[in-house]
Image (spheres, rainbow, N blue to C red):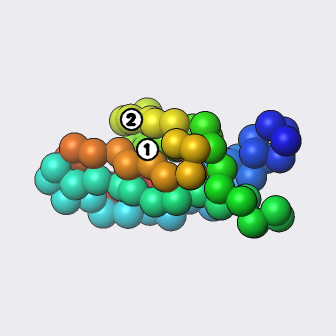
Amino acid sequence: MFMKKLILLSCLIASAFITQAQVNGSVKGKLIDTTIKQPLSEATVSVMLLKDSSLVSFIISDKKGIFEIPNLDAGDYL
C-alpha cells in the first residue's frame, strides 16, 4: 500500500502544474488514489521554486488526504 502511495505521489509531483502564488497565498487540496478511489493519508506534498527546484515548504496530508501549505510569497512554483 505504501508503494502505491509513493508511486502515485511521484506521478503527482512529476505532473505538477506551475502556479502563480500571491503574497501570503496558500496551496490546498485533497489527494486521492485514483486506483482505489481512497484518500492518500500521510503523503508528502512539496512546493518548490520554478527557477531552481529548491524546496520552499512541505507538509504531510491528514487521514482524509487533505493538505494546506500557507504563507507563500508571490512567485512561480512547481
Residue reaching furthest to the front: 63
Task: Tell me the quarter of the image containing the N terminus.
Answer: top right
Question: Foreground residue, 53 or 2?
Answer: 2
Residue 30 horizontal side relative to residue 34, left or right: left
The residue located at (16%, 50%) in the rendering is: 24
Residue 41 horizontal side relative to residue 53, left or right: right
Type of amino acid at the residue the image marks with label 1: Val
The residue located at (39%, 56%) in the rendering is: 28
Figure quadrant of residue 41: top right
Question: Foreground residue, 70 or 63?
Answer: 63
Element type where label 1 sits in the image: strand
Q: Residue 6, position in %: x, y?
A: 75, 41
> Mark 2 highlights which residue?
57
Q: CA distance from mark 2 to mark 1?
A: 5 Å
Q: Residues within 10 Å of mark 2 (few under 14, many from 20)?
A: some
Figure quadrant of residue 71: top left
Q: Residue 69, position in %: x, y?
A: 35, 45
Element type where label 2 sits in the image: strand
Q: Residue 13, position in %: x, y?
A: 61, 51
Sequence-earlier tag: 2 or 1: 1
Instruction: State the count of labels.
Output: 2
Q: Residues within 10 Å of mark 1 (few under 14, many from 20)?
A: many
Vertical placement of residue 46 versus 39, above or below: above
Residue 35 horizontal side relative to residue 18, left or right: right
Residue 7 horizontal side relative to residue 65, left or right: right
**Res. 58 in view:** yes
Vertical placement of residue 60 versus 22, above or below: above
CB of mark 2 within 8 Å of CB of mark 1?
Answer: yes
Which circle marks residue 47 in the picture?
1
**Res. 51 in view:** no
Which circle marks residue 77 in the picture?
none
